[in-house]
Image: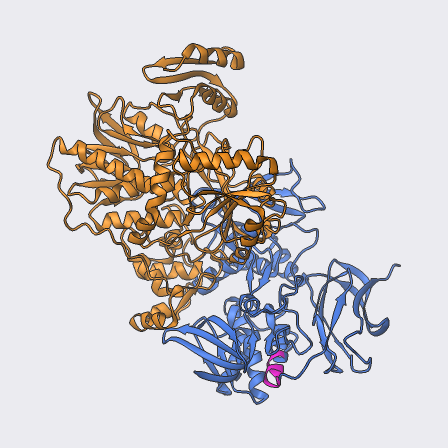
Amino acid sequence: MANILKIQKKLSKRFGDRVKAELDGDIIRLSGSLSDWSEVVEACLMSSEKNSNIHVVNDIEFTGAEIPKMRVPSLSDDELEGKTPDVLVIGGGISGCAIARELSKWNINVMLVEKEADFALQASGRNDGEVHVGVDLSKGSLKQKYVLLGNRMYDKVCEDLDVPFERIGQYACFTQSYLYIPVWLLVQWRRFHDGVTDARVVGRKKMLEDNPTFNKDFKFAMYNGLAGVVCPYGLTIAYAENAAENGVEAYLNTAVLSMDTENGEIKAVHTNRGTIYPKIVVNAAGVFSDDVAEMANDRFYSIHPRRGTNSIQDKKAARLINTIASVQLIGKQTFSKAHTKGGGLIRTVHGNVLAGPDAVETFDKEDISTRPESIKTVYDKQKQTIKEVSERDIITYFTGVRAPTFEEDFVIEWGRRCKNMLHCGGIQSPGLTAAPAFALDIEKMIVDELSKSMKVERNESFNPKRHGVPVLNEMSPEERAKKIAENPDYGVIICRCEEISKGEIIDALERPLCPPTVDAIKKRIRPGMGRCQGGFCSPLVTKIIAEHENIKISDVRKASAESVICFGETKGGALND
Amino acid sequence: MIKTDVLVIGGGPAGLAAAIEAHKNGAKVILIERESRLGGILKQCIHDGFGLVRFEEKLSGPEYAERFIDEFRELHIEALLLTFVTKVQKTESGFVATVVNRDGVMDIEAKSLILATGCRERTAKQVFIHGTRPAGVFTAGTAQHFTNLLGELPTKKCVILGSGDIGLIMARRLTLEGAKVLGVYEVKPTPSGLTRNIHQCLNDFDIPLHLSHTVTRVFGVDRLEGVEVAKVDENMRAIPGTEEYIECDALILSVGLIPENEIAENLGVEIDPKTKGPKCDASLMTSVPGIFSCGNALHVNDLVDYVSESGETAGRSAALFSGKERKMASVIPGDKILYIVPQKLDTLSVGSETVVYFRSKEVYDDSIFRITVDGETVFEKKYAFLRPPEMEKVIVDFSKCGLSENSKISAEIEVTVK
């Protein structure tokens, strides 16, 4: 049990009487008032114990700025009014979508709601896509357990869901020879104690032979051959599509606003699209998982949002790297302590080079804006991995917000004060790697629970196989010609950088759950992801969407309902061709 | 397999001129165009001012293109439209291009190749604009596509970053469509576009031009709601404290064009880091024998007239290409020259009328452009002013200076101090 007196003593020494700690059942509740967000984070972190299941709940009043409220879609209707799903999954990120898909193996009524205009629009779509090996984690945490299980599942999951995945290995590179022995010992410990069976130490000669562009100052590296890359939003969308194909009802632009509870049980869930009456609620709400927990009077952990910015380089830069690599800096950023695996430089599954991410605490859960200093931090570091890496090759950059608890572990358990809420909170890196594994455990927890009150049977028509949109530019000329003969639109190239055809765009529009927006098409099949960033193809994609949906061009959106692209016809109107 | 003498990739002004000229020089020509109509980017350039040099007439972009398209059709040159080149390979006898279109996948064998692939626009992220990612950030060409080809208004109230010509043209165009252009912001202390465009597109419409300013951030989650602009120092870095928030619904970027040379690079063509186009000799042959470059793929032109001219040179050279030996000497630009084309001369076939294009690095008044070979002046021209946005063309006679591979050919701008 946490020693609350000891915690209070530490807090008083640092913050005087500005922060108070109290033990509230199995919660360490902090209260008081601070004007600096970094102090709020510091107070909570010094009160917490890593991986502990006694969580710090942050009730400190932050006076430095107004914390923005959760953005809610403008849509308002009663489409979902009165629905009674067996399971309501809140959140269309990798966790929610994977859980929904695994639950679709059963003859139960599963509904998923996502407040954004598409799946994987927040953390699941804004990360580096690395499939981790867990070499930075010690035994005993949920993260460590699920990262190992999840990593091994990737080949099968990606094959079933028709998502590209590649095990390209990972190097953690060291410039200090004196660290060889400690790192070697750590590697043995990880292999034989923690189950990270692929960990190795690789000498300088072999490392530079295989990776001639690496910094010549490296003396050795820790290497993990099972590290891989996947398209994080591609996998999330694939899970969602397969869930839908197997009977899950999923709704975008649908935000959970509040809940009615009675005797520690959720009775009703209010959304902008009506009130839902589920038996079980799965809280996979990412950065908002503590807010959703609060709605059910079950907030026993707090999320402290942490921004991370990644940049994507032109495919031309892929000549520099064919793996995952990062320099290991000693000091504050040591690999075992940093709040990011360091990411580093990653050759993505689509053949770009990704650099990042950094890690910056923020009070704004939806602050996805980028800042120049993030790019600088990452490049200052990664130029020590590969000297030729240059900001000049950047074609885009983006920011995501991680959802850690102060204990930095996942929260996967039934509610403590609410019986029918299952928490899947605190999911941050390596959440993408872990999701396929914890989704199976959550499936089992839910089936066991539902079985107490109803007969739960297998969904006999469940099909684990999903077939994505065919990728024409990866086909042999013969295969490609055959597909074009079937549908000539496959021969009309719309996106020149990524070589995407009109036929593929129409296929994507016809996939389950695909919103007819420019960003949704971009995320599914990549027009606009290349070096011109949609300069040439975005008007064409807009026009194809308008034609396919039979709407006006000015009614096509980038993503959300408010993301207007064009305001209507010019004085002369459209050209007739 | 389809066979041809000359394969032209790109059906814009450069490719059209190249195909016509190659045909006139006796070659069998096939032109590949990825869009459904010939004309390239001229199709969306509905303003006038095209053809002043060539036709001594003010034409609109489509009118200028039509003159070439008409001739192209009259000569019955073969064009494959809505056709995209996926790969080009070098073979013993020339090149094989793999293309896709609605009929399938096919290979085309050619003795020589003309790359007339144009250029693309630099994007917001390439000039390191930060902030959110709303709808409403357009490159000027994309905004022009929406406005002029799709007939859709992409903004009601915008800020334009960059004073490149397309940005200036769009400032006027959007104003005529009833949109409010709040200002054009240029990071450099001098405008990037042609002087005539500054007058005709900005001054005539009271659109302010803010030099030494840039956009540092965009705001808005769904649609753009505003931008932050700031003054910049001599190193073009934003000066803290000078930031200003401007409410608008779009940011339109005209921050530079980059020649498209992915096919060239895959074939091992040497690229000039200054032009970002292939290094060519006076016949516009690249470092790979049989591959020619022209138009904006070679270097970014400010007048289409010169695009057509380089297309004709490349077309003629490609038709007459025989694979004979070349002995190259480099043209070395001095420090006041932004770039010079051609970058190399074939000393075995030196013409008396070599066309040389160059741009100055900065604005220079009263200066002399000079070419020397081994210290001897072979060409000299006085300029009252030289400006980077305005490309200069001169014709130089290299035939009498006994060029060899060891010749030191230099080009220099001398500013005459008063």
From the viewer's side, name the closer residue of A159 and B358: A159
Q: Is residue A165 left or right of residue B42?
A: left
Quarter residue A428 falls in: top left
Q: Which residue is situated farthest in the right direction here?
A: B418
Q: Residue at x 26, y 36 (%)?
A: A441
Residue A568 at x, y percent in the picture = 40, 55
**Number of callouts:** 0
Q: For the stretch drawn in magenta, what is the main secondary structure?
A: helix
Q: Is residue B160 shown to the viewer in this render?
A: no
| Left or right side of B110 for A502 | left
Tell me, what hue is chain B?
blue
Q: Position of residue B390 (x, y in %)?
A: 69, 64
Residue pictured at 64% horizontal, 38% vertical:
B242
Depicted B134 relative to depicted B338: above or below: above
The span picked out in magenta is B314-322
The hue of chain A in the figure is orange
Q: Residue furthest bottom?
A: B26
Q: Relative to B26, is A60 above or below?
A: above
Asked if residue B236 is positioned above or below residue A12 in the image, the reply reads below
Q: Position of residue B212 (x, y in %)?
A: 67, 48
Q: Residue at x 58, y 36 (%)?
A: A329
Query: The N terminus of chain A appears in which quarter of the rendering?
Result: top left
- Residue A565 in sight: yes
Q: According to the image, what is the colour scheme of the structure?
A: by chain
Camera-side residue of A488 and A253:
A488
Instruction: Indicate the quadrant containing the C terminus of chain A: top left, top right, bottom left or bottom right.
Output: bottom left
Rendering coords of residue B338 (x, y %): 72, 61
Residue B74: in magenta span: no
Q: Nearer the viewer, residue B154 or A570?
A: B154
Side of A295 relative to A81 (left or right): right
